[in-house]
Image: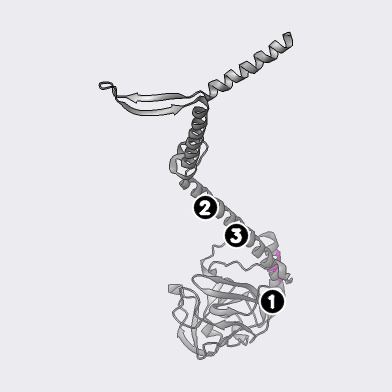
Amino acid sequence: MAGNKNGNNKKEGSKKVISKIKHKSRLVLMNDDTFEEQFSLILSPINVFAWGGVAIIVFTSLIIIAIAFTPLREFIPGYADVKTKRIATSTAQRVDSLEQQLNSNIKYLNNLKIILSGGVVENDTITTEPLKNIGDQSITEPSYEDSILRAGVEEEERYNLSFQTGDGQDDGLRNILFFTPLEGVLSSEFNQSIKHYGVDIVAADADAPVKSVLDGTVTLATWTSDEGHVIYVQHKYNLVSVYKHNSVLLKKVGEKVKAGEAIAIVGDSGELSTGPHLHLELWHNGNAINPIDYIVF
């Protein structure tokens, strides 16, 4: 009998709780002076909980959207403003570019050392980073390895009567037969006072090949905004020939070339160019020399 009473009491308690939850009440707004009903709303505890939950979810969603898609997020600790993010991204990109440029410069210097020492550079290690104008480079003390190389070259040239070292009046280069790099008309001559360290040649044919003046090795083949497609060729006896404003380069760094061999196609590349032509420079022992004194145009 006691068990039945307890079971009945639990059922009656559950019914009372359910009845209270479903019990409806009326919320009435009345005019205080006339007691006229202005608004009425029937509510129950379960409706209040349901509508309250929906309101909380909507309010929370609006706050999240406002923080995620409006400048309000900048006032929350831990969020960076747009300007800071742009600066950080730009800085990271510049650091990455500088790192790549540094690695390329290191590879170029290593390749140049191999070429000057008579070695051959592998194709997969070639780098063609631009160099500054030879005439604008600062003079530094030679390294120990460079001193040994210079001494070896001087020893080889000591008994070569065709290439005597001197004050520049008789450098022996006039005894060399230079190949004409391009058939055309001289439009601008060598003028060291205005830093025009070469001559300009206008070709009769727009697609004429540019040819190497002597046998040598390509030490630079690149493109710059000022000089366009540029190629440098290292020759014997510390002689370097430079060919600028080409439209196409036909040789890569490390390749051997013969005198008269085509190394580029004449063009009008670079901001300093005023028309299709070849700008030719000759450098001997680090000094610019006038190509007209050695080459027949």
- Mark 1 vs mark 3: in front: 3
**Label 3 SS:** helix
Q: Earlier in the sequence, mark 1 or mark 2?
A: 2
**Predominant secondary structure in magenta?**
helix
Residue that carries the numbered disc 1 in the rendered image: 255
Picture layout, residue 210 above or below residue 102: below
Q: Name the residue at 54% across, 90% down.
A: 183
Q: What amino acid is at disc 2?
A: Ser
Q: CA distance from mark 1 to mark 2?
A: 38 Å
| Percent of width and height locating residue 44 | 49, 26
Q: Which residues are magenta?
A: 148-152
Q: Which mark is residue 101?
A: 3
For the N terminus, the quadrant is top right
| Percent of width and height locating residue 270 | 49, 74
Give 20 or 218, whichever is nearer the viewer: 20
Give 58 or 231, whichever is nearer the viewer: 58
**Label 1 SS:** loop
Residue that carries the numbered disc 2 in the rendered image: 90
Residue contact between numbered discs 1 and 2, judged by CB atoms under 8 Å: no
- Mark 1 vs mark 2: in front: 2
Which residue extends farthest top? 2
Q: What amino acid is at disc 1?
A: Glu
Picture layout, residue 65 above or below residue 100: above
Picture layout, residue 86 above or below residue 60: below
By what rule are the colours in the image chosen?
Answer: one colour
| Percent of width and height locating residue 221 | 61, 73
